[in-house]
Image (cartoon, rainbow, N blue to C red):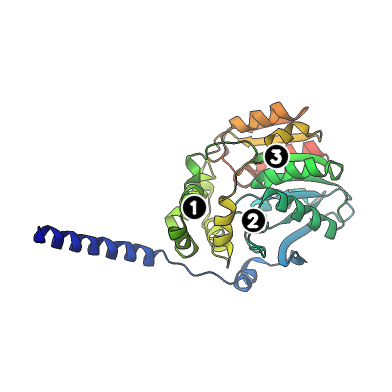
Amino acid sequence: MKKILTITKWFLLLLLVIIVVFLIKDFKSDIPAETLKTKYAVPPSQFIDLDGMQVHYRDEGNTADTVPLVLIHGTSSSLFTWDACTLVWKKNHRVIRFDLPAFALTGPNADNVYTYQRYVAFVNYLLEKLNVKKCYLAGNSLGGAIAWQYACSYPEKVQKLILVDAAGYKFERGKGAIGFKLTATIGKIPVLKNIVYYITPDNIVKKSVEGAYFDKNKITAQTQQRYMDFLLRAGNRRALVARLSLPMQDDESRIKTIKTPTLIIWGEQDGLIPVDAAYKFERDIAGSKLVVLKNSGHVPMEENPEEVIPLVEAFIGN
């Protein structure tokens, strides 16, 4: 019996050492916002004071355009996800994009609360600050959910709506959402939650980015590093846990009330939100148009912008 207890003790000690080594290996300090601004907030980036935050945004293109194209990114993403599309769209349109609270350079809000209602209010306040009376509104993933809910709350301010692999319906996260699943699960366990604030395995972040793409070869080292940098921005890991602890869908019955002309774009190979959701949006939004892209994943505007760009231009007109 004594021998068994001794073996057990040494086994547990060895297991503890292995766990500690693993955690130390993946420990990452927060990166100060000012450090990241030096790297990423180059012109035409700007910042605006809003609700106690320094909101990072870009306002580009045709200054005479009275109905700008407003672009909203998804969870753990940034305004940079729209880079390739903006290069083309800004030739004819005023294009506004920004980092949502909890993510990228904008970072967390004061009370670390990220409900859809708060996001809708944030978008409205920001557009008012930028003197936008009416816009074409596009959103991807979480940004898509914010976009359609904004259209429900302020239909008079949205001329046309563009949903790109948008959240909105109840669903089981697909196989590409390993990082979100792990963070959400650990975040619900008080004893373990603090681990997520400091331990960020490179492989988990890498797999999460890959999960958003169909063609993994299109993910550049620069893109991979950007996602990691913004996750490590001071406060963003805590904010991500707070966001993922909330429901991923809202009152989906509101979708049927949308009267705004709507274009739905979806990657058929989406590993996070199954393509079934695209057909639900098409069914529930009267008069909407759906285009499914066969070789795209969850972020087609980033993976295959050459397919998304003409669809949006044809929809909103030049």
x%, y% of residue 45? 72, 64
Q: Which element carries disc 1, helix, strand or loop?
A: loop
Q: Which element carries disc 3, helix, strand or loop?
A: strand
Q: How many marks?
A: 3
Q: Is residue 231 visible to us here?
A: no
Estimate how packed mark 1 is, as few (under 14), some (14 to 19) or many (20 or more) residues with alpha carbons within 10 Å. Answer: some
**Mark 3 or mark 1, which has the lower sequence index?**
3
Q: Which mark is residue 188?
A: 1
Report the residue at 68% width, 35% height from top: 252
Question: Closer to the camera, 184 or 76?
Answer: 184
Determine which residue is flagged by label 2. 78
Amino acid residing under circle 1: Lys
Real-space Cα separation, disc 3 to disc 2, in angstroms: 17 Å
**Which of the 4 image quarters holds residue 63?**
bottom right
Tell me the quarter of the image containing the C terminus: top right
Question: Closer to the camera, 318 or 56?
Answer: 56
Q: Which element carries disc 2, helix, strand or loop?
A: loop
Report the residue at 67% width, 65% height from top: 110
Left/right placement of residue 10 relative to residue 226 reads left
- In the rendered view, would you say 266 is above or below 232? above
Determine which residue is flagged by label 3. 163
Amino acid residing under circle 3: Leu
Real-space Cα separation, disc 3 to disc 1, in angstroms: 30 Å
Report the residue at 77% width, 66% height from top: 48
Estimate how packed mark 3 is, as few (under 14), some (14 to 19) or many (20 or more) residues with alpha carbons within 10 Å. Answer: many
Amino acid residing under circle 2: Ser
x%, y% of residue 59? 78, 58
